[in-house]
Image (cartoon, grey):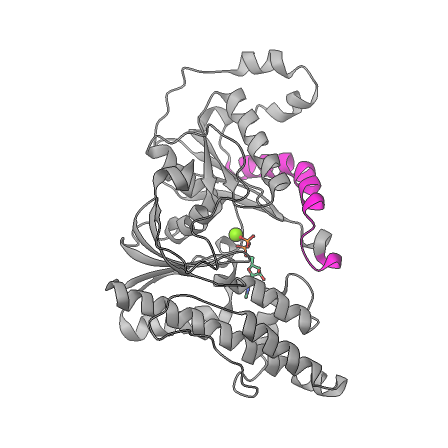
Amino acid sequence: MMRPLSVFRQGSHCFFLLNCMDTDKAFSLPSDPILGIETSCDETAAAVLGADGKVLASVVASQHAVHERFGGVVPELASRVHIEMIERVVMAAMEEAAVSWQSLAGIAVTQGPGLAGALIVGVNYAKTLSYMLGIPLVGVSHLEAHIASAWLEEPEFPLPCIVLVVSGGHTHLYRRDGQGVSHLLGCTRDDAAGEAFDKGAQMLGLGFPGGPALDRLAQVGNHTAIPFPKSFFKKDSLEFSFSGLKTALLYKVQAMTEQELARGRADLAAGYQEAIVRVLVEKALLAGRQTGISALAVVGGVSANTRLRTLLEEHARASGLRLSIPALRFCTDNAAMVAAAGRQALATGSRMAIDAEPFTTLGQPGHNCPERALTKETAHS
Ligand code: ADP
Ligand code: MG
């Protein structure tokens, strides 16, 4: 197996690059595998999708241990760890997938939104690799990648559908009309749902990242014991807000003694989680009713939440709603979803011509969420 990045490090890369170039290689989908690379935040990830779109390998190196003591992601540290990890992670994915470099149809890499330094590591690694192998490279929106995760294990999931993206940076509701074509229906005016989980967990002394820890603690708490405000805005609104809820938790924690907090922590976690999750479910279902669409995909790190999954599955069973929630390993950041979005983009002829775009987004939070088409250009360029 060729190990191109080892050669890159020896300093003789110009000569080697020219020897490795295969500019005549015909691009063909879906008959060849795709390599996906993700470095937008604090996960270094690589994955290979087979010709049929099935996941052959998905490797994720999480940096949680590096950032934990700071209570959040430190961008400069994230970039450095991506540099250390990226080659190992890509090699591990290629070995696990047992495909040759020459058989790759193309490479997909997260282009934005994300941390600038972190994105640059993945984008430049992917560019070098694609140049050396003489295969196409496509830059993928991180949001498009999360959305694509809904089809990873359910390729027959119908369109149009409603998509709820809930992660550390986004709480966005879309109507998805075709692959690569989304219309923003609503988003958060302040914190993202994942941010609300992380900040709530911090107030409860649960460490970082807090979402999974709060989820676990809430499972042994009573969500009706301590009431929390649920922010729905107007009856028909598809916008979200979690800042008032966060303040409510802060006041409750400040009003409790150490002993009360020790006894009530699980109930606080359960009540707080319930207020986030109920609003997410209500708004997603409202979007379905407003558009007359009865298929819902829920993606992003928060879609791993146990209570959210349970409520959505119960509702889907009772109402006949078509529901797609990715398997847990594809909810939080991973590269299989990047490869899946890239596969779509490559099939439509998209190619990467520019660099990392840390501030790209599919709709501006806090600005009444104007409906905006997500075209192929905004999604994949
Ligand atoms: P990003 O926001 O960088 O795209 P992810 O899509 O991986 O990252 O989402 C990370 C967010 O998901 C974090 O805020 C994390 O706390 C949250 N999260 C992960 N698992 C859970 C869970 N089980 N319950 C609630 N939140 C979760
Ligand atoms: Mg993400």
Q: Residue at x 26, y 63 (%)?
A: 291
Q: Nearer the viewer, residue 345 or 87?
A: 345
Image coordinates for residue 183, horizontal then vertical, percent: 33, 52
Q: In the picture, residue 323 is in which quadrant?
A: bottom left
Main SS category, magenta section:
helix
Q: Magenta span has 91? A: yes
Q: Nearer the viewer, residue 329 or 236?
A: 236
Q: Reply above or below: 80 against 277.
A: above
Image coordinates for residue 54, horizontal then vertical, percent: 40, 44
Magenta region, residue range: 68-97
The residue at the far front in this view is 367
Tell me if I can see residue 129 in this picture.
Answer: yes
Image coordinates for residue 366, horizontal then vertical, percent: 48, 60
Q: Magenta span has 155? A: no
Q: Reply above or below: 177 against 38.
A: below
Q: Residue at x 44, y 68 (%)?
A: 309
Q: Residue at x 41, y 42 (%)?
A: 341
Q: Reply above or below: 218 against 344.
A: below
The quadrant of the image that shows the C terminus is top left
Q: In the picture, residue 289 is in which quadrant?
A: bottom left
- Count of marks placed on residues: 0
Q: Nearer the viewer, residue 55 or 66?
A: 66
Image coordinates for residue 152, horizontal then vertical, percent: 40, 49
Q: Residue at x 67, y 14 (%)?
A: 12
The residue at the far left in this view is 292
286 sits to left or right of 267: left
The quadrant of the image that shows the N terminus is top right
Tell me if I can see residue 3 in this picture.
Answer: no
23 sits to left or right of 45: left
